[in-house]
Amino acid sequence: MDWVTVMGYVAGACTTSAFLPQAIKIVKTKHTKDISLMMYSILTTGVLLWCVYALINHDWPLALANAVTLFLAGWILLLKVRYG
Amino acid sequence: MDWVTVMGYVAGACTTSAFLPQAIKIVKTKHTKDISLMMYSILTTGVLLWCVYALINHDWPLALANAVTLFLAGWILLLKVRYG
């Protein structure tokens, strides 16, 4: 694996794992007042499109990163809808 | 421009513009208590790496999307640091 691909995976690890502390924070506090519903609605849609784009381009770092982000962003979106 | 590239730009428009309503919400309310500092620290780092990855791969939809996301995520990070 060349270093550019490695960098893609590191980038993906960051932009993916970034959403985990936000989800954990919400689960702990049950507070989502400061979080934008519109942000997570648009973000979840966009991440789904990136997944399709990456799969078509056989861009595996991008595909893997967005599949996990889709799960986490979707989770935060559901928590926001639940807690308001 | 083929439809896959167009989809990349649409995906980028979503995952980029998604952060704008969050930034606007913070500017209006001056409240960031529910927002995770760790999320935006990791995210900003990751988006910067995606920018470099995309430029090296000549992947313009990915590069453009991440350049704007870098600006918006960095802005939210600064607002979070400011308002706590």
Image (tube, coloured by chain):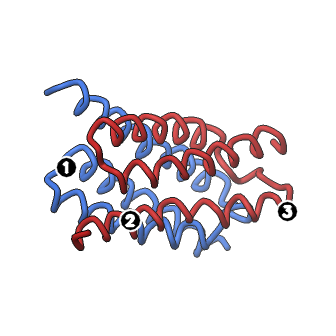
Chain colours: A red, B blue
Say which element carries label 2: helix
- Relative to residue B78, is residue A61 drawn left or right? left
Q: Are marks 3 and 1 in contact (CB under 8 Å)?
A: no
Cα–Cα span, label 3 and label 1 = 39 Å
Residue underneath mark 1:
B59
Q: Determine whether the residue tagged by mark 1 lies in a helix, strand or loop.
A: loop
Would you call the spot at circle 2 few (<14 residues within 10 Å), some (14-19), or many (20 or more)? many
Residue picked out by circle 3 = A29
Q: Mark 2 falls within which chain?
A: A
Residue pointed to by mark 2: A9
Give the amino acid at mark 3.
Thr
> Callout 1 environment at 10 Å: few (<14), some (14 to 19), or many (20+)?
some
- Identify which residue is drawn at 42% across, 34% down: A49
Foreground label between 3 and 1: 1
Given the image, what chain letter belongs to the residue carrying mark 1? B
Q: Residue A2 location in percent, x, y? A: 22, 70
Q: Which amino acid, mark 2?
A: Tyr
